[in-house]
Image (cartoon, rainbow, N blue to C red):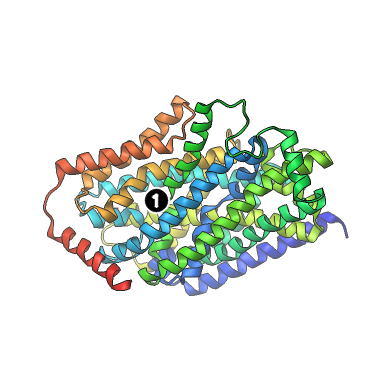
Amino acid sequence: MSDQVFLYIALGLYFALMLVIGFVAFRRTQSHEGYMLAGRGLPPWVAALSAGASDMSGWLIMGLPGAIYATGLIEGWIAVGLLVGSYLNWRLVAPRLRAYSEVSRNSITIPSYFENRLRDRTHLLRIISSVIILVFFTIYVSSGMVAGGVFFESAFGGDYLIGMVIVTTVTLAYTLFGGFLGASLTDVAQGLMMVTALVAVPIIAIINIGGLGETAHIVETVGAGNLSIFGSASLGAGAVALVIISGLAWGLGYFGQPHIIVRFMALRKPEEAASARRIGTSWQFLSLAGAVVCGLVGIAYFEKTGGAPQNPETVVLLMSQTLLHPLIAGLVLAAVLAAIMSTLSSQLIVCSSALVEDIYKLARKPAPSERSLVLLGRAGVLLVAIVAGLLAISPNDSILGLVSFAWAGFGAAFGPIVLLSLFWKRLTNWGAIAGMLVGAAAVFGWKALNTGLYELLPAFVIAGVVAVVVSLFTARENSAIEREFSETQEILTASK
């Protein structure tokens, strides 16, 4: 049996597993709230692994190792920023958002939470936040489709477009029918596959190279500074500072990622956020450490064996194919697909909720039936996938580049507003609207300036300042807001 056949068998088994899970979720999804939020019934381990897997898209196994392979350990500051940001997100946002979103008129989407929390009768806040979700998630979903196409090109020597279509079609199949529950359950399986691959591949590669010492020696020989978190001596202090600050700034993005924080809203109880945090942070540490080590080990492995990848973002794919039995290599390739598809499915569900729950349902009076809403949710998933697919046909940026821009967009537009809405009761709807618009615009503007500083950091700060200033000028006493803020605090206090 040829190597290629083994690869196809492994991928076939993986695709079949995803479709079976999607079908199980389909049988358990009867209502619109069930389709969008799994009825707020996720156990902590499902929420933790689902949040991690939907967070770490194809860039975890392709983009981040590729950046480390090309530049060295200095790019690892991204991993540090993400680990700290993820921990703080679970610690600060998760329990409070779970409680507050239910207290505030049982909000099941981020835009509806903003509107209900801030009593925005104009509906502008809900509409603007939905549009921001659609704009940046279309870019984000497109990055996942690009990763799928690159994956098939590298792993099978196949056609980029065909690979992109296959990955998108299978993801659509279980997302369309399984909804949020289907995306979350498949995320669990995908998250376990991802972390296993990222731990196993570098260990096997190090053994093959001749041990840890030999690997480190080759990595350092190939490029002075490859093993330094401050880069090579040729880099100036200013350049190093920019890389470090930009890498750490990635952590700020967590507070505003709708596909991640919606998992907090789906927890069974606020107090379960603590155990979910421990599980999620452990998974995150192993996955990020594995991705960084994969990139470094790849430098030594390809220096010793030759055949360096033309595209650095395929370093893990190539190592697994040359080091492992074809069937095992196929399972590693399936883990790469898992990273891509887990994020795709989660993002499509959030886009669907923005279209149906926050735009269509708002405009349609009287409200449609539950069955109609579920069908419309599925139609929304399909529509966003088509638009993102058209953008992905001819990508003009790397996977990491596409992800970093979308990550910055959400982090700056939503991050300050989420934090302020949870911890500052004087935030107003006009402050939130101003902060969102300025944050989103600042991401585009700072990116165009090309300063070398990651656009998320300045945009996040500017958005937060604008939201606070505008809120101070527009604040009015509101007994309902005061009551909900106090009630949320009481729930959190009682759950400790």
Does the rendering let one see residue 164?
A: no
Q: Indicate the secondary structure of the residue bearing disc 1.
A: helix
Q: In which quarter of the image is the N terminus?
A: bottom right
Q: How crowded is mark 1: few (under 14 residues within 10 Å), some or many (20 or more)?
A: many
Is residue 34 found left or right of 211 in the rendered image?
Answer: left
User: What residue is shown at x 32% (from left), y 51% (from top)?
Assistant: 419
Q: Residue at x 28, y 73 (%)?
A: 494
Nearest the eye: 327 or 425: 425
Residue in front for this viewpoint, 480 or 142: 480
Q: What residue type is labelled 1?
A: Phe
Q: In this view, does 47 lie to the left or right of 131?
A: right
Give the x, y percent position of residue 325: 82, 58
Whether residue 186 is visible here, answered yes or no, is: yes
The foreground one among 190 and 149 is 190
Name the image quarter holding residue 76: top right
- Taking the image as shown, residue 321 lies to the left or right of residue 490, namely right
Please name the residue that numbered disc 1 is placed on: 255
Q: Position of residue 192 (x, y in %)?
A: 61, 63
Residue 118: horizontal and vertical position, in percent?
22, 53
Q: Is residue 136 above or below residue 279?
A: above
Corner quadrant of residue 3: bottom right
Q: Quadrant of the C terminus?
A: bottom left
Vertical comparison of 99 with 475: above or below? below
Determine the residue positioned at 64% across, 38% down.
Answer: 72
**Residue 39 image position (x, y, % from top left):** 40, 70
Counting every numbered tag in the picture gives 1
